[in-house]
Amino acid sequence: MTGYEELAVLTARFPELLIVRRFDCLTNRMILALQSELLYLEKEFKIYMDDAETSTDLAGMSASWGKTREAFENGTGELQKEKFEEVQDKLRVYRKCKMARGRTYAKSCIRRNSSEVQQGSTAQRAD
């Protein structure tokens, strides 16, 4: 056994030895890029929905989920449906990244706060 396999066996046996990178900077960069993309998609989606309001077949989509679903199902709102699904998919990815980043941040705050508490109690005992 060598390389990753040996390291995996060792860290499985002694999990406290495992050190992994969190890629905080890269994660933040991806979240920011997704935010920018979502802003763009939001504007596009609004344009598609505004255009739908001027069409007799699609009027009322922005005010009623029933009209929206009907237009999606009968194919008259195909462009709007495609944009809706694109935004929905991108939001899912964004939320996952954001949640993962939040958990990582929360864990680091908890670790930092608990170590500060431990240091404080040690300092109090020394007094």
Image (spheres, helix red, strand yellow):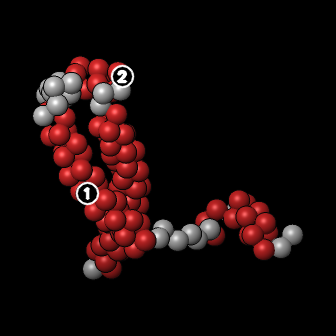
Closest to the observer: 68 or 51? 51
Identify the secondary structure beneath mark 1: helix
Closest to the observer: 66 or 106? 66
Q: Is residue 30 above or below residue 58?
A: below
- The kind of residue on which mark 1 rests is Tyr
- The kind of residue on which mark 2 rests is Glu
Identify the secondary structure beneath mark 2: helix
What residue is drawn where x is 36% and y is 40%? 82
Residue 27's image quarter?
A: bottom left
* 73 lies left or right of 66: right
Can residue 103 be seen by looking at this rendering?
no
Measuring from the top left, give residue 22's x and y in whole percent. 48, 68
Measuring from the top left, give residue 52's x and y in whole percent. 19, 35
Name the residue furthest right.
Answer: 1
Q: Is residue 45 above or below residue 24?
A: above
Closest to the observer: 11 or 72? 72
Q: Which quadrant of the figure contains the N terminus?
A: bottom right
Q: CA distance from mark 2 to mark 1?
A: 26 Å
What residue is drawn where x is 14% and y is 33%? 53
Mark toward the viewer: 2 or 1? 2
Residue 64's image quarter?
A: top left
Measuring from the top left, give residue 107's x and y in whole percent. 40, 60
Closest to the observer: 81 or 56? 56
* Number of numbered tags placed on the structure image: 2
Name the residue furthest front.
Answer: 56
Can residue 70 be seen by looking at this rendering?
yes
Q: Which residue is labeled 1 in the image?
A: 40
Circle 1 residues within 10 Å: few <14, some 14–19, many ≥20:
few
Q: Return the mark for residue 73.
A: 2
Name which of mark 2 and mark 1 comes first in the sequence: 1
Q: Which quadrant of the figure contains the C terminus?
A: bottom left
